[in-house]
Image (tube, rainbow, N blue to C red):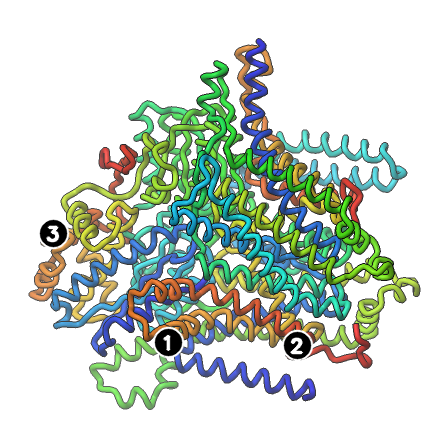
Amino acid sequence: MTSDILNAFVLLANFIIIPSIAYGSQLALGALGITLVYAVLRFANFAHGDTMAFGTMSTVLITWWFQSLGINFGPLPTALLAMPFAILITIAAVLFTDRTVYKFYRSKRSSPSIFVIASIGVMFVMNGLVRFIIGPNDQNFADGERFIIKARAFKKMTGLNEGLAIKVSQGLTVIIAIILVIALFWFLNRTRSGKAMRAYSDNEDLALLSGIDPERVVMLTWIITAALITIAGTLYGLDKSFKPFTYFQLLLPFFAAAIVGGIGQPVGAIVGGFVIAFSEVTITYAYRKFAMYMGPDGWQPDSLLQLLSTDYKFAVSFIILVVVLLVRPTGIVKGKVV
Amino acid sequence: MKKLLLASTVLALMATPALAADIKVGTILGFTGPIESLTPDMAASAELAFKEVNDSGLLLGGQKIVSVRGDSTCIDSAAATAVAEKQVTSDNIAAIVGADCSGVTGAIANNVAVPNGVPMISPSATSPGLTTIKDNGFFFRTSPSDARQGEVLASVLKSRGIMNVAVTYTNNDYGKGLAESFGNAFKAIGGKISISSAHEDGKADYSAEVGTLSASGAKHLAVFGYLDQGGKGIIQASLDTDAFENFILTDGMIGDALIKAIGKDLNGAFGTLPGSDSGGARAFQSMASKAGINKDGPYTGSSYDSGALIALAIQAAGSADRAAIQSKLMMVGNAPGEKILPGELAKGLEILKRGGDIDYVGATNVEFSPIGEVFGTYKEVEVKGGKFETIKVH
Amino acid sequence: MSNTLRATLSFTTMAILFVIVGYAQSWSVALVIFNLCLISSVMALGVNIQWGYAGLFNVGTMGFAALGGMATVLVSKAPIPESWAAGGSDLMIAALVAVLTIASIIFAYSRTPKGTIRNIIITIFLIVGFVLFRPFFDPAVAAIEAVNPANAGYLGGLGLPILLSWVIGGLFAAGAAWIVGKISLGLRSDYLAIATLGIAEIIIAIIKNEDWLTRGVKNVAALPRPVPYEIDLQHSEKFIGWVEWLNQSTLAAVSDADRPAIISKLVIEHSGIFVKLCYSGLFIIVLAFVFFLSVRALNSPWGRMMRAIRDNETAANAMGKNITRRHLQVFIIGSAVVGIAGAMLTTLDGQLTPGSYQPLRYTFLIWVMVIVGGSGNNLGAILGGFLIWFFWIEAEPVGVWLIDFATSWMDGSNPVRLHLMNTAQHMRLFTMGVLLLLVMRFNPGGILPEAAIRPKRQK
């Protein structure tokens, strides 16, 4: 009886809750970068996914170097040690891109579409560059312990039918995401630079009138974005593996998460990330086993009790996006723009 | 987007000065794309056959075969057709070894090979749909149709007492075709498919798919995918969440790269792939190992056979004329005649020179049906101690 | 340099490039590239209509091209009676349910005041509709897909000539554009970009997964052709005679023994070129037609109004112009053109391969064409289509050759050299990106910039 309910809960936790939390954190971090750029620089950065690939590539290369030198981080992945250096490299790359590409259009006050097209150009460049340097194949760079708790160990411990597995990378993602979000909010709300950024984002002309240095704000935005991008990409790569093509594919869920949550609002990006992650999994999950646990003993439903087939998993994010655009275009947490 | 790769054209040009008497054969495989980790070995196997023929010096009085590599991209029909068009009309190849994936193979056959009268042998296109294309006798394959692999796999499962499986397949014509053929065959012998759903390659996260697959209640998961794409991701996610520990694999998943990526948790996984352990297969395997080719890689044997058949047909025809080659392919591949195994190509060339008949058996027991297909044999393999071992041949 | 001079120079250069390819590689290859360039130009024209006339940022061209491809199958393939018998009636009922549900939702939407009640009613209609839909739809689909899955497994088409599908493809795309436009056109431009990108993905997902419609990922091959088959030409007495006549001088110099072989080779070669030229002819007609219409529209009062709206939306709004409706018109027209191009492409391929619709190739590349060629300028879009596609294809062998040349002093097995050779193809992406950025920075109008209606003010 109670074990049935416990089993049902563990089942959900293992297949829906834990993966969604991890995936949602990854999406949230990515969407945060997008929303920041959108809020301050006022355009949708299509190069986000491939810049993430670039940042992760730097981490991977430095990790390999560290590994060859025999450096390791015990049970944690060596990539964590490599990350700070990779962040520096990515910051340099991103600032370089801004200086050579976007700055010109800012000075001309070009329309957002121009920025987006320019970011498409940057996307192509990053795309080709990453594949050129590291190749298009899958690269594994995770080391250290893989699991915090293994499913089988859990089953033994609790004697339940269903196991619960938590990977080190999932745990890391959630912890680091929480730290980053707290740090970001502290920065935006408590420091002068952060407030300057928010002011610039809310009303550019007034901010300039108050004496805020726009170039400094822009530079700070890119630096923060670069750090977020590298960390998000590395955590994602540790959890799955590094393959340049996948990062390009992540672009769309990031945008969906940012818009659904309310673009231009950091809180929105986080909410959006989790909404997208949870919906993808819950809408396509087959609840048959769950129903069997919760229902009367011995009941075996014929069908899989699935709302939408997993074939459409990818489309779920867009359907949600479209529904949000129809019903509440500013997003869940009222963002900028209509 | 998957791109054209002609790197080896340059390599081939570099390696030996192209003599006027060289015969060019196109090797069009997906060097970029879902099976890019398998195609280098396949190309190397075909080129191994060419090298053997060249070294013997017996082909048409000393002519050499030069392999012209082209990237079929496996998924972009327009690109594959463009590559084939270039090779046929600009490089003037005599025949094609290719392509690897069924969709682009059909495109190349229909748009380039058949209209231009170029014989084409595919080592790995297994879609049942290719059986009925109008090819005027110009399209052959040394890999059997998946219509058969589905039946073989079903009978393997039955013999192991597994009557309930979950199926996940990669969302393209290979995966879907195999899933359908397996589904029909398995149900016909009383098996139950608790769920059969697609997965997209190159995606971020497969936890949703795995969750749904496991909720179906089956204990065994059949993965019809690619070992360096979604198939691997699904196995990884299944092991992580302990959704499945028993995996059933097919040709696109069977390769060392998978064992390297997954590790010892893969022990006990089994599956089928075209191949055999006949004398010819073993002869090829030792040749391949010596040449640095992974002998267990799928379709290496059939690639070698494709190359060998073309070379032998050229000899039988007495020229590198495309139509002449096509007319002799059936003859050199089928009985009656002196049986030729891998490594015996010089012997075959000699017999043909004297006007005799041969029956090329090769690494995969080649015997063409009237429409240029092979019935084929399948190896049942299992992962034991970190390696794929052949259990039985069906 | 005036626009006309630039245009003449650019197109002449393109022509010369094609001739070079024809001699260096082969005429067949040159024609293959030429045909794809024609199709890309039509797509670029469609995108340019949306961007140049109305400043609409449509990044979902992939979906519209796919709809055009789908139309070729649905129009030209013969219907499959068994599938219709197996699931046709249930499918019709399911379709009826869907239509009724949508109609009732629209009814409720327009009749009830905005608020929670309306949302609740709509949600109820949706749920009821869904629950009624599934029991008819699911078994119909299963039955249809079970009919000979290896070679059919779908309903088939209408069995009409394939050229008709080009028009129908345009109509499909226009219909989808209407829906997409209604949803997303009120939004700001980059928002529109993301929305269209997402919707294109949804369209592709549907085509890939609904086997009963167009076989999904199993592909539909052997589509009927609007031009002769090479094999038929090779066996036609008239054609052979014509080839002999064309090559009299070559044949006269050949001995009698060799003649049949040489004739046969020539016939095969010529049949290929003839078929490709037929396609070129058809595509040129479509391109000319679309171009002509676009230019007429551009220079009409409607066109001037559209561009004026684009340049100063606030003023236009103040004047009472219904901007969203105008934008919708342009959006639909531009998407229809892309749909036609999609149908043309699938006809040329001879098969529908849903898996080959990738955003990079179909959407972003087209944008590079429009920007580099000349945004807002129809001739510029055509030039962009030719130029960028040509380089996209030729950059491959040329890039490899360049790298080989640059590293020829290295030993053949040098890992750096091998790595460079293997990854040379990725330079293609890199170069495209750099090209786009350079053009946008230093020549934002493109090679053939828009002819100003009046002197351009600095943006």
- Please say if the residues under marks 2 and 3 sit with CB atoms less than 8 Å apart: no
Residue type at tag 3:
Lys
Query: What is the spatial separation of the Cα atoms under label 2 and label 3, in whole angstroms?
Result: 69 Å
Q: Position of residue C92 (x, y in %)?
A: 64, 39
Q: Which subunit holds the residue at mark 3?
A: B
Of B369 and B203, the residue lying toward us: B203
Q: In which quarter of the image is the N terminus of chain C?
A: bottom right
Say if labels 3 and 1 share a chain.
no
Give the label on residue C442, or none.
2
Q: Write the residue at 33% across / 45% down.
A: B145
Query: Neighbour class for label 2 at 10 Å: few (<14), some, many (≥20)?
Result: few
Residue type at tag 2:
Phe
Which residue has dot 3 on it?
Answer: B339
Query: Neighbour class for label 1 at 10 Å: few (<14), some, many (≥20)?
Result: few
Q: Write the residue at 52% across / 51% down.
A: A56
Position of A211 with respect to A180 (left or right) is right
Of C8 and C441, the residue lying toward us: C441
Q: Write the residue at 71% across / 73% down.
A: C376
Hey, which quadrant is residue A289 in on the image? top right
Q: Reply above or below: A184 against B326.
A: above
Label 1, secondary structure: give it: helix
Q: Write the residue at 87% across / 61% down.
A: A209
Look at discs 3 and 1 and give the one toward the viewer: 1
Query: What is the spatial separation of the Cα atoms under label 1 and label 2, in whole angstroms?
Result: 30 Å
Q: Can residue C164 be seen in this view?
A: no
Hey, which quadrant is residue B54 in on the image? bottom left
Label 3, secondary structure: give it: strand
Give the label on residue C405, or none.
1
Position of B93 with respect to A207 (left or right) is left
Q: Position of residue B241 (x, y in %)?
A: 48, 29
Q: Quadrant of the C terminus of chain C?
A: bottom right
